[in-house]
Amino acid sequence: MTSALRLEKITPENVDAALELRVRPEQEKNVAPVATSLAEAYAFGDTAWPRLIFDGDELVGFLMAFLDIRWNPEKDPEDRRSGLWRLNISAGHQGKGYGRFAVEAVREEIRRRGDSRLMYVSWEPGENGPGDFYLKQGFRTTGETTGHQTVGVLDV
């Protein structure tokens, strides 16, 4: 990992490269492909924050945050949350600090938008899942699930 790490918006110039990004085959069951994430970003509008992760000129990953969404409006209309929705680090670039950079980038964006509470994430439990990664980043489980995914939080 170099100091040339940056996030970029998805543009007509980089969308094809984004769509080609792949995690390791054994991880594919744990995270949606970038194409699915981009369709969801379009559908969710301003509450989705998709970005590509570059190291210099090399695309190394994709992240998407959710920002200030109503979590469960029927249960608690005041419960608004922000966090990391998707994280795809390309197969050849994992274990090099790009995931940690992504978590911190989302955390900083949440702060920039004036939220100082908690950052949320959810993950598929089990083998080849990202749970250990998120726990190493400081997330702690809440006891909640969303679907069958484990929910974790990190102080902003």
Image (tube, rainbow, N blue to C red):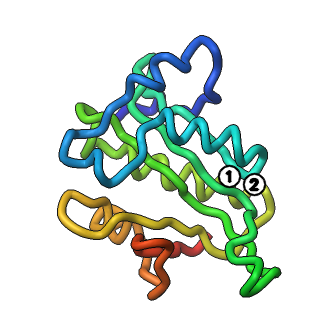
- Residue at the (47%, 79%) spot, across then down: 145
C-alpha span from label 1 to label 2:
5 Å
> Residue 3 placed where, x, y %?
45, 33
Quadrant for residue 84, please give it: bottom right
- Position above or below: 92 against 119: above
Q: Determine crowd level at label 2: few under 14, some 14-19, many 20+ residues with C-alpha closer than 10 A.
A: few
Side of 69 where 84 appears, left or right: left
Q: Are marks 1 and 2 in contact (CB under 8 Å)?
A: yes
Q: Amino acid at mark 1?
A: Glu
> Residue 120 placed where, x, y %?
56, 69
Quadrant assignment for the C terminus: bottom right
Depth check, front residue: 34 or 57: 34
Side of 135 where 36 appears, left or right: right
**For mark 2, what is the residue?**
112
Q: Amino acid at mark 2?
A: Arg
**For mark 1, what is the residue?**
109
- Residue at the (66%, 64%) spot, across then down: 82
Side of 103 where 98 appears, left or right: left
